[in-house]
Image (cartoon, rainbow, N blue to C red):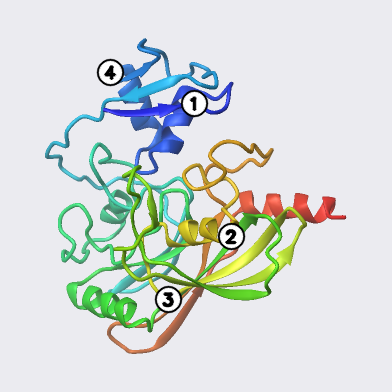
């Protein structure tokens, strides 16, 4: 049983719980509500119930059961593909791989439909998955179509020869033009669904540089030296500049922007790697998604 407290009034119950559980799709949350697994102040409510600040929400997460992972005809934005790798531009809101309670609608389901073969190194739930993006982080990522390719790509990530560059819109005006954030990351000591900078965490290093300033907001580029869970989100929050729209590490619901974005304003812009078979150095780039471009257009038009 997991408990939450609503901070903002007027937010739908299903939207609130989806924001609090990044690995759950909204449809899955709605099913949990319909199955009576969610209570608001001790009472069952419908998915569209509007919360009031201070409401106590409890969620009973059913134990994981064995499930068959099936191919699904889900459209993919494919940037490159050959017999060894496939590079896609992941949409915001798409979970990368099945997890407890989420066995459909994921990138893995889509890849299983599109590809005849995927690397089996990461097991039945994560075929082909070498690295991942958070559900509400969009952008470029690579999957392996053979075990040989998987081993090569995983080694490149470990050796830091594969480079990943992100762009994010954060709160506040970052004073420095560029910087390096270092802070070991591990599970939050109180909230186990969050990551945090902790003494016994794994080494994490993020390089950032300012691309554009908007007074109360800043557009930054982040390059990962390591690849810890939620690394950019944790590190930027640590230096006082959480990502716009981030429901987990943002402003704890105390600040509500009129930006039409679901989740954090974070996009994987670029991935550079050596082809696992030919050795060719390859770079894959994507444009910012429309939701982030819309925010930037607004900030540029209203900048003083």
Q: What residue is shown with label 3?
A: 225
Q: Compute the Cα span from label 1 to label 3.
A: 36 Å
Q: Which residue is labeled 2 in the image?
A: 168
Please state which of the two labelled residues, at mark 4 or mark 1, is closer to the viewer: 1
Which residue is found at the position 16% from the left and 64% from the top? 120
Task: Assign the N terminus to one quadrant of the image.
Answer: top left
Q: Earlier in the sequence, mark 4 or mark 3?
A: 4
Report the mark closest to the observer, 2 or 1. Answer: 1
In the displayed orientation, state which residue is furthest to the top. Answer: 43
Describe residue 5's horizontal placement relative to residue 208 as left or right: left
Judging from the image, what secondary structure is the residue with disc 4 in? Answer: loop
| SS label for mark 1 | loop
Question: Tag 4: Cα neighbours inside 10 Å, few (<14), some, or many (≥20)?
Answer: few
Does residue 234 lie above or below 280 as drawn?
A: above
Label 2 CA crowd tier, 10 Å (few <14, some 14–19, many 20+): many
- Give coordinates of residue 158: x percent, y percent: 30, 78
Given residues 185 and 31, the one toward you in this image is 185
Q: Earlier in the sequence, mark 3 or mark 2?
A: 2
The residue under label 1 is 6
Q: In the image shown, does 170 or 103 lie closer to the viewer?
A: 170
Q: Indicate which label's residue lies in the foreground, 1 or 3.
A: 1
| Residue 186 placement, left or right of 172 | left
Q: Nearer the viewer, mark 2 or mark 4?
A: 2
**What's the CA distance linking mark 2 and mark 4?**
37 Å
Q: Quadrant of residue 211?
A: bottom right
**Front label number (4 vs 3):** 3
- CA distance for labels 2 and 1: 26 Å
Determine which residue is flagged by label 4.
35
- Sooner in the amino-acid sequence: mark 1 or mark 3: 1
Q: Is 175 positioned to the left or the right of 120 in the image?
A: right
Label 2 or label 1, whichever comes before in sequence order: 1
Query: Which element type, helix, strand or loop, lies under badge 3?
Result: loop
């Amino acid at each position: 049983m997991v408990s939450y407290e609503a901070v903002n009034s007027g937010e739908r119950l299903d939207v609130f719980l989806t924001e609090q559980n990044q690995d759950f799709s909204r449809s899955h949350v709605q099913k949990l509500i319909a199955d009576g697994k969610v209570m608001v102040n001790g009472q069952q409510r419908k998915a569209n119930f509007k919360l009031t600040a201070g409401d106590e929400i409890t969620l009973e997460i059913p134990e994981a059961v064995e499930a068959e992972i099936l191919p699904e005809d889900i459209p993919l934005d494919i940037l490159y593909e050959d017999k060894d790798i496939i590079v896609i531009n992941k949409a915001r809101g798409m979970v990368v791989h099945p997890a407890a309670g989420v066995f459909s609608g994921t990138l893995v389901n889509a890849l299983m439909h599109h590809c005849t073969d995927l690397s089996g190194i990461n097991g039945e739930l994560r075929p082909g998955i070498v690295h991942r993006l958070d559900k509400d982080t969009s952008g470029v990522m690579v999957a392996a179509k053979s075990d040989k390719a998987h081993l090569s790509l995983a080694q490149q990530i470990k050796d830091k020869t594969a480079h990943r560059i992100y762009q994010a819109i954060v709160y506040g005006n970052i004073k420095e033009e560029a910087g390096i954030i270092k802070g070991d990351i591990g599970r939050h000591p109180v909230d186990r669904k969050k990551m945090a900078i902790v003494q016994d965490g794994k080494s994490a290093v993020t390089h950032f540089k300012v691309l554009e300033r908007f007074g109360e907001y800043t557009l930054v580029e982040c390059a990962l030296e390591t690849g810890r869970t939620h690394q950019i989100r944790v590190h930027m929050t640590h230096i006082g500049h959480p990502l716009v729209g981030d429901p987990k590490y943002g402003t704890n619901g105390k600040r509500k922007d009129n930006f039409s974005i679901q989740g954090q304003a974070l996009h994987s812009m670029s991935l550079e790697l050596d082809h696992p078979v030919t050795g060719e150095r390859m770079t894959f780039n994507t444009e910012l998604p429309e939701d982030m471009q819309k925010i930037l257009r607004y900030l540029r038009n209203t900048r003083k």
